[in-house]
Image (spheres, grey):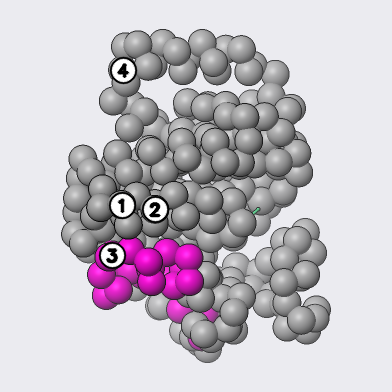
């Protein structure tokens, strides 16, 4: 695992955009795995700026989003469909028919729907680069603590902590979804590369457990320790509880020296 330590959120976003832009340029028909939330917002803004400056083309790319709340129409202001449309898809030239997001409006036959989502990822050739945030409870996607490390796309009940973290953006407890459709940890681990972003002290405990803790279903992100090509780009606050920061800096210097392609 590569751990890239940055000063603050702006630096995390810029470095992540450099990484993603490099991946898109080296494989124009890239299949991206996309995330929502406050963390990747800066990354999307940077990618949009690169696209508008004429230096980044998504016309041959495809994407698969990690998750969507169950029960929210695409147009709902808190749906991930809405988030992606507002912050990314409406501003870049990624063809809409190749931008996939789990459908939060389905009302039955969930397993069948989720199996189809998995099949469409495979049919697209698999995810080349999966972008992730991390929850305070260590979740990736909506793989809440105790999710199977082999889990696939499925309907998942949200944890109390996730409901608390997100309730403020809904008009009341009753409007806050209780479930989501999410890619599984097994699905995420099949991506060829993974890029996890984190910023702020509220993520420090989860980041420390994900990178330095034991692999455990109690911390879904710790499963990334089993992935051969993961890069964490995190700021000083999110790195606060890591014990090996000096070593990560040394590893990064050596990577820049000997295998710089690993960083682009
Ligand atoms: P956030 O969410 O980026 O809004 O903090 C991350 C997550 O819950 O995965």
The answer to which of marks 4 and 1 sits earlier in the sequence is 1
Q: Are marks 4 and 2 in contact (CB under 8 Å)?
A: no
Q: Name the residue under label 2.
A: 49
Residue 186 versus residue 10 in the image, above or below: below
From mark 4 to mark 3, how far is it between C-alphas? Answer: 30 Å
Residue 156 vs residue 198, the one in the foreground: 198
* The residue at label 2 has a CB less than 8 Å from ligand 1: no
Q: Name the residue under label 1.
A: 53
Left or right placement of residue 169 versus residue 256 in this view: right
Q: Are marks 2 and 1 in contact (CB under 8 Å)?
A: yes
Residue 147 versus residue 245 in the image, above or below: below
Q: Is mark 1 on a helix, strand or loop?
A: loop
Q: Name the residue under label 4.
A: 259
The answer to which of marks 4 and 3 sits earlier in the sequence is 3
Mark 2 crowdedness (10 Å alpha carbons): few <14, some 14-19, many ≥20? some
Mark 4 crowdedness (10 Å alpha carbons): few <14, some 14-19, many ≥20? few
Q: Residue at x 42, y 64 (%)?
A: 88
* The residue at label 4 has a CB less than 8 Å from ligand 1: no
Q: Residue at x 30, y 73 (%)?
A: 96
* Mark sitting on residue 94: 3
The answer to which of marks 3 and 2 sits earlier in the sequence is 2
* Percent position of residue 39, x then y: 59, 51
From mark 4 to mark 2, how far is it between C-alphas? Answer: 28 Å
Question: Which quadrant of the view contains residue 167?
Answer: bottom right
Q: What element carries label 3?
A: loop
Q: What stretch of residues is rendered in magenta?
A: 84-105
* Percent position of residue 95, x then y: 25, 70
């Amino acid at each position: 695992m590569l751990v890239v330590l940055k000063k603050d959120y702006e630096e995390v976003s810029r470095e992540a955009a450099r990484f993603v832009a490099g991946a898109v340029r080296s494989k124009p028909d890239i299949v991206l795995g996309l995330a929502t939330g406050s963390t990747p917002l800066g990354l999307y803004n940077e990618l949009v700026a690169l696209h508008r400056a004429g230096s980044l083309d998504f016309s041959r790319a495809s994407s698969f989003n990690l998750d969507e709340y169950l029960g929210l129409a695409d147009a709902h202001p808190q749906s991930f469909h809405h988030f992606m449309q507002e912050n990314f898809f409406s501003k870049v030239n990624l063809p809409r028919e190749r931008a996939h997001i789990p459908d939060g409006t389905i009302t039955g036959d969930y397993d069948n729907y989720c199996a189809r989502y998995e099949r469409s990822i495979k049919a697209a050739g698999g995810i080349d680069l999966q972008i992730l945030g991390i929850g305070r409870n260590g979740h990736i996607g909506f793989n809440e603590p105790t999710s199977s490390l082999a889990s696939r796309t499925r309907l998942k009940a949200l944890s109390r902590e996730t409901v608390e973290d997100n309730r403020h953006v809904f008009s009341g407890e009753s409007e806050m979804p209780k479930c989501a459709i999410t890619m599984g940890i097994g699905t995420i681990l099949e991506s060829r590369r993974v890029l996890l972003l984190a910023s702020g002290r509220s993520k420090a405990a989860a980041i420390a457990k994900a990178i330095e803790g034991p692999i455990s279903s109690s911390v879904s992100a710790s499963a990334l320790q089993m992935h051969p090509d993961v890069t964490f780009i995190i700021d000083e606050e999110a790195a606060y509880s890591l014990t090996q920061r000096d070593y990560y800096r040394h590893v990064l210097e050596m990577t820049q020296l000997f295998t710089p392609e690993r960083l682009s």
